[in-house]
Each structure stands twice: as structure tokens, then as C-alpha cells.
Image (cartoon, rainbow, N blue to C red):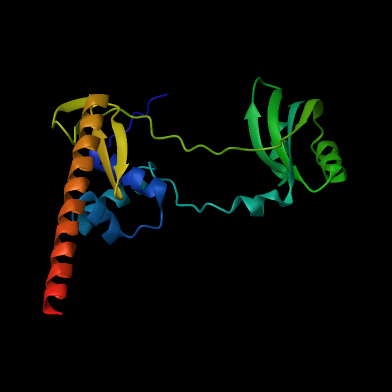
């Protein structure tokens, strides 16, 4: 579902930067966005007030999460509110009015049995979770923005590219490809000039010796 919220391209770039690193300071965000600190502060205040940004969190080392065995269960219950009472139940997904898929983190089978009996649900199927792969979904939103390569203004979901701690928006794959090619050429030229300067310094040093 596409979000229907009043944000612009600067808001969205700010959100992408914070999704990568929520500890970035206002000064760092301002530098990466090319705007003033007061602009970033006012944008953050508005995004928080409008509940577009609902909080800032941390990402734990996966090793810390392996202290528990995670089990997925398909269950039936007429008292879903009871599921909220058990901290071992770490995820709840509803299929129908009575059918749910839940994930439970437990140390052993006895603890799992206590959860099942305490919550009073019927187990249809139980499966151990061997591995979990976390994926971060980008915001799905169509906004008016100007392509960072061709300058074309459109209202669409932008193609997002992150380069040297900055976020760029493009209107099409061609603009993204040409942007990358331009940046590669600039990097090659910069390295070539640095090598020239380094060789000149070496030649000057050898001449003095």
C-alpha cells in the first residue's frame, strides 16, 4: 500500500539517511543533505509530530539473539488478547478471526509447553525456525522530486542510490547508469591527478638529493 503522507524529496532523503544510521547528528544530516541545521531540525520535528518517524532504534548483534530457540506455530484461539501476555511470543500474525501464525522464543520444550498451556491456544502446526534473514523495506511513497542527474521534475516513486554518505534520486535507470558512469570518470580523473602530484613531489625530492 502506498503511503498517503505529505512529505517531499528532502524529507524522504532524510528518512533514508536515518534508516541507515539513526545516530547521525543534525550537523551530519545537514552536511549530507546540503541544507542548514535549522532546516534539518524543523523537518525532524515535523516528521516526528506527524508520526511519520515514530522512533529511533538500535540493531543488535545476531549472536545476542541466539540465546533462544525460535519456533513458528500456526494456531487457533478465541482469546487472541492472551497472546500479548507472554513475552516469549515475539511475533503475532493473524490469518482469519481465529487462526494465527506466531513466533515463540524459548529456552527449551518445557518453556514452550508452558506458553501453549498458559495462552490456551490450539496448535495446528509447529516448525523450528532455523534461520531468519532481516530485510529493510524502503518507504513506498510517490512524491514530487527533481532527478539528481537530468533535473526532470516528476511525481513518482524515485530510484534511490546512495553514494559517499549521500542519497540521490533518479527518474529512470538510464539517469542512474549515467550518474554512476560520470562519477566513475570523476574518480579516475581525481586519482590520475593525485598520482601526477605524487610523482612530481618524488621527482622534486630526488632532484634536491
Q: Farthest residue toward the top?
A: 96
Q: Where is residue 47 in the image (x, y as percent from the top left)?
A: 33, 45
50 with respect to 10 (left or right)? right
Q: Is residue 172 visible?
A: no
Image point (65%, 54%), residue name? 64
Q: Position of residue 130 (x, y in %)?
A: 71, 37
Q: In this view, does 129 lie above or below 77?
A: below
Image quadrant in which you'd find residue 80: top right
Quarter of the picture holding the N terminus: top left
Quarter of the picture holding the C terminus: bottom left
Image quadrant in which you'd find residue 103: top right
114 with respect to 131 (left or right)? right
Image point (18%, 36%), residue name? 148
Q: Is residue 171 visible?
A: yes
Q: How many marks?
A: 0
Q: Nearer the viewer, residue 156 or 50?
A: 156
Q: In this view, does 48 lie above or below 116?
A: below
Q: Position of residue 52 (x, y in %)?
A: 38, 41
Q: In this view, does 159 lie above or below 57?
A: above
Image point (57%, 53%), residue name? 60
Image quadrant in which you'd find residue 145: top left
Q: Where is residue 162 in the image (x, y as percent from the top left)?
A: 31, 42
Image point (19%, 58%), residue name? 195
Amino acid at each position: 500500500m502506498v503511503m498517503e503522507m505529505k512529505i517531499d524529496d528532502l524529507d524522504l532523503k532524510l528518512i533514508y539517511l536515518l534508516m541507515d544510521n539513526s545516530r547521525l547528528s543534525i550537523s551530519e544530516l545537514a552536511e549530507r543533505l546540503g541544507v542548514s541545521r535549522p532546516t534539518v531540525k524543523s523537518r525532524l520535528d515535523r516528521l516526528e509530530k506527524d508520526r511519520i518517524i515514530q522512533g529511533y532504534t538500535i540493531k543488535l548483534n545476531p549472536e545476542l539473539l541466539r540465546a533462544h530457540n525460535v519456533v513458528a506455530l500456526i494456531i487457533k484461539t478465541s482469546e487472541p488478547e492472551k497472546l500479548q501476555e507472554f513475552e516469549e511470543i515475539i511475533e503475532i500474525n493473524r490469518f482469519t478471526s481465529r487462526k494465527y501464525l506466531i513466533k515463540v522464543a524459548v529456552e527449551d520444550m518445557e518453556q514452550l509447553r508452558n506458553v501453549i498451556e498458559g495462552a490456551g491456544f490450539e496448535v495446528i502446526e509447529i516448525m523450528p525456525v532455523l534461520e531468519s534473514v532481516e530485510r529493510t523495506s524502503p518507504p513506498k511513497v510517490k512524491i514530487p522530486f527533481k532527478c539528481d542527474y537530468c533535473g526532470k521534475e516528476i511525481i513518482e516513486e524515485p530510484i534511490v542510490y546512495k553514494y559517499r554518505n549521500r542519497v540521490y534520486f533518479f527518474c529512470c535507470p538510464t539517469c542512474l547508469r549515467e550518474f554512476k558512469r560520470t562519477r566513475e570518470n570523476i574518480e579516475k580523473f581525481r586519482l590520475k591527478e593525485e598520482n601526477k602530484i605524487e610523482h612530481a613531489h618524488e621527482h622534486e625530492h630526488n632532484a634536491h638529493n
